[in-house]
Image (cartoon, rainbow, N blue to C red):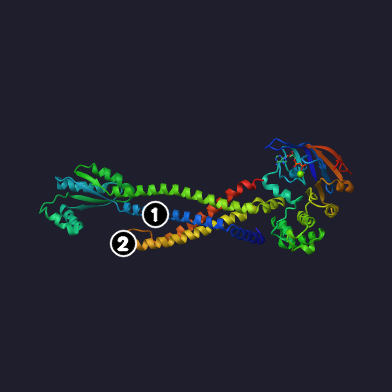
Amino acid sequence: MIHMRNISKIYDDNGTIALDHVNIDIEKGEFVFLVGPSGAGKSTFIKMLLREELPSSGELIVNGHDVVHMVRHDVPYLRRGLGVVFQDYRLLPDKTVYENVAFAMQVIEAPRRLIQRSVNSVLDVVGLREKYRCFPSQLSGGEQQRVAIARAIVNSPALVIADEPTGNLDPDTSWDIMDIFQRINKSGTTIIMATHDKTIVDRMKKRVIAIEDGHVVRDEAKGVYGYAV
Amino acid sequence: MRFDTIEYFVQEVFRSLKRNNWMTFASIGTVAVSLFVLGVFLILVLNVNRMASMLESQVQISVYLQEDIKQVDRVGIGQDIEKMQGIESVKYVSRDEAKKRLAERLGDQKYLLDALGDKNPLPESYEVTVKSPDMVETAAAAISKMDGVEEAKYGQDVVQHLFDITRLMRIFGLALMVLLAGATLFIISNTIRLTVFARRREIAIMKYVGATDWFIRWPFMLEGIVMGFIGGIIAAVALRSFYAAMAAKIYDTLAFFPLMPQYPFMNYITVALLLAGMVIGAIGSTISLKRFLEV
Ligand SMILES: Nc1ncnc2c1ncn2[C@@H]1O[C@H](COP(=O)(O)OP(=O)(O)O)[C@@H](O)[C@H]1O
Ligand SMILES: [Mg+2]
């Protein structure tokens, strides 16, 4: 699913080496935690998968797309195979729950009938079918993040990427979110999640990749968070 | 493109036209004023141009003969001219005929001629017309070198003047056009930039879920095009009444003035203005989108 060889990322503007010769392979169906201190390079890692940032050197294949040599024109098609969730939800405040999710299908010109069916089904997955007419401001943080997850999976991506999705949520709510991720993963979707949440990582017993200062310092199959909180 | 997509684009355009209503208003106003001024220039240039070519096509060469010329030589000159390339007709004007014409032209002031008594200072001449206007100059030059010809004159001054005027107007008009187009582009792209800014979150999400650049670009392009189009309509309507009023005035006072007839001339101008407005709108929005789409 992801094949990363000697990937380095140096930000041109300030010369920061955010990733330094990283080698990682992630298979289809895996659930991977990306851990490490602040500024380690986790978000940079994720941005490269989405081709929001271009690697400075190395090879990167994501879901069958050669990200390094990809032309601009093909970027949207890479992203259609990926779902992405952020710490700050990034919902559109003037659209309802339903519209926020449907938006992700509208803008890739999915047929209207398919949109209706898919949106209803993913709202079931995240348990927000009843609140489809609410606006984000009428929802709790956890509910908003569930809408964001629904939006990320509505186009049936092969890979869901989440950058600290529980960063703004209390522990109980975080578990609800992890529960959803786990169910999505069980249906065969690969999940990569950058997180600071020790409890979650330790309890889930999934693969853990630890990054420090741009280097992969640890990669364990049933790992733990490994940092003092 | 899907019908749903078109519906979505149209909704987006009207939403943002409403959202930025002051800037929208200012943009449309600027487009309208700029296009109106451009239109006025276009009309002026085209009319003066037309007048110049009409005069030019009527150009005759007046060939004045030397005073002491013999009749044989005079006839010979006439034949020589007729044999030249590109000559349409040659007409002899006697001294009496010339005096009669002068008298006619003087009208009320004919008494000036009376002072001459029986004397006639006017020379004999030929009126030569050529087949095409661009031959006038060479023909006149050749004729004036002939023996027995005093001088060969044509309305070069007037025509030359008119052409000089149109050339100036064209240059000036072009400069003005560039300036106005620049100002219009500036204000349209700023309006679109506001829209882009207002919708930056939406655009970021669109990019994350894999919308193509063109899908993202279209609503903004359409917004620019719609503003340009509305500005064009306003300019065209104003210009049409302006031209109608001007035409009425000119027909009243200067009936002979060869003004372009309103139809279909003004229809072409209208189409030109609408197209110009839409093109400017599209370019304006492209400018403001270029930087931010490169993510
Ligand atoms: N757009 C950017 N321009 C320059 N430097 C950046 C940029 N984004 C991140 N960095 C730097 O790269 C390093 C890694 O950042 P990031 O990937 O955000 O780390 P993390 O997500 O693990 O906290 C940091 O030193 C950060 O300051
Ligand atoms: Mg980060």
Disc number for residue B195: none
Residue A27 vs B44, above or below: the answer is: above
Location of residue B263 by image quarter: bottom left
Where does the image place residue B226, in percent across and percent down from the top left? Answer: 56, 58
Looking at the rendered structure, the secondary structure element under dot 2 is: helix
Residue located beneath label 2 in the image: B253
B201 left or right, relative to B62: right
Precedes in sequence: disc 1 or disc 2:
1
Spatial distance from mark 1 to mark 2, Cα to Cα? 18 Å
B86 left or right, relative to B267: left
Three-letter amino acid code at the position of disc 2: Thr
Where does the image place residue A69, in percent across and percent down from the top left? Answer: 71, 41
Q: Residue furthest left?
A: B118
In the rendered structure, the residue with mark 2 lies on which chain? B
| Towards the viewer: B24 or A118 | B24
Three-letter amino acid code at the position of disc 1: Leu
Residue B255 vs B174, above or below: the answer is: below
In the rendered structure, the residue with mark 1 lies on which chain? B
Residue located beneath label 1 in the image: B44
Q: Is residue A77 visible?
A: yes
Where does the image place residue A121, in percent across and percent down from the top left? Answer: 79, 61
Looking at the rendered structure, the secondary structure element under dot 1 is: helix
Q: Are marks 1 and 2 in contact (CB under 8 Å)?
A: no
Q: Is residue B255 visible?
A: no
Q: Residues within 10 Å of mark 2 (few under 14, many from 20)?
A: few
Q: Residues within 10 Å of mark 1 (few under 14, many from 20)?
A: some
